[in-house]
Amino acid sequence: FNNFKLDYKKIEKILFCSVVPKSFILIKKFLSKKTKVKCNEVKNLNLKSFIKIKVNYKQVGSDRITNAISLINNKNNFIILDFGTATTFDVLIKDTYAGGIIAPGIRLSLNTLSDKATLIPKIDLKMVNNVIGKNTISAVRSGFFWGYAGLIDNIINLIKKETRKSFKVIITGGFSNLFKKSIKTKVNHNKDITINGLIKISELIK
């Protein structure tokens, strides 16, 4: 924040989409010293005008709700695949958030593997053409790349089978660029889904 030039007097609304309470508290304290504008968190607002939620509201992350609200149009069904700390799949059926799937995050899994298996170095995940690795690094890359590609296609197909519905699949987050062309499922890449959802939700703040 110290290196970010901002005229705090021009701030009219503050809206957070936070799944890390400690960070939210720190930022909220900082902004409360800089501005008198109330800091709002997505789940503290009444979102009923945007979306119906069929699951335990307390256990759905603000980021996942925000992503769903960004896309909702009451006509289409969506699967939102977000490559974040966790790899999440959220199911949006017209105006209803129906639930989702949480799989281990790719970066977290890579780091855990190298931390626990001392002979495996930290690596960057890249697209690979061959399945069979010729050394430790290429073997790990293959396992994660093709393993997650298979996981993605399989979960999307299972969602379609269980719901008996068709979906538009939207991908976002850190590794979305890597997988958008390597999976069998046709997807649309949307890196701005969360910020667009926040802009939409900010209409509730008067």
Image (cartoon, rainbow, N blue to C red):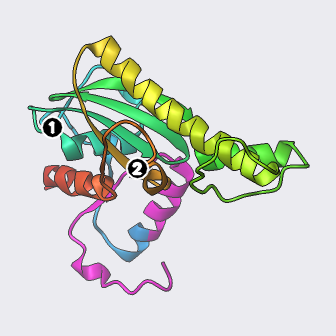
Question: Compared with residue 6, is residue 141 higher up or lower down, i.e. above or below?
Answer: above
- Residue 69, label in figure: none
Observer-side mark, 2 or 1, equals 2
Report x, y in % for residue 206: 13, 56
Per the image, the residue denoted by label 2 is: 181
Count residues near mark 2 (Cα–Cα under 10 Å), then give few for <14, some for 14-19, many for 20+.
few
Report x, y in % for residue 171: 36, 46
Q: Is residue 6 magenta?
A: yes
Q: Residue at x 38, y 27 (%)?
A: 156
Question: Compared with residue 36, is residue 102 higher up or lower down, i.e. above or below?
Answer: above
Q: In the image shown, does 195 or 157 lie closer to the viewer?
A: 157
Q: Which residues are magenta?
A: 1-30
Q: In the image shown, does 138 or 10 lie closer to the viewer?
A: 138
Count residues near mark 1 (Cα–Cα under 10 Å), then give few for <14, some for 14-19, many for 20+.
some
* Disc 2 residue type (three-letter): Lys
Residue 55 visible in this rendered orientation of the protein: no
Question: Mark 2 or mark 1, which has the lower sequence index?
Answer: 1
Is 168 left, or right, of 161 in this rendering?
Answer: left
Q: How many marks?
A: 2
Q: Is residue 50 magenta?
A: no
Q: Secondary structure at mark 1?
A: loop
Return the residue found at the far right. 119
Per the image, the residue denoted by label 1 is: 50
Report x, y in % for residue 191: 34, 58
Q: Residue at x 25, y 42 (%)?
A: 45
* Disc 1 residue type (three-letter): Phe
* Measured Cα–Cα span from mark 2 to mark 1: 32 Å
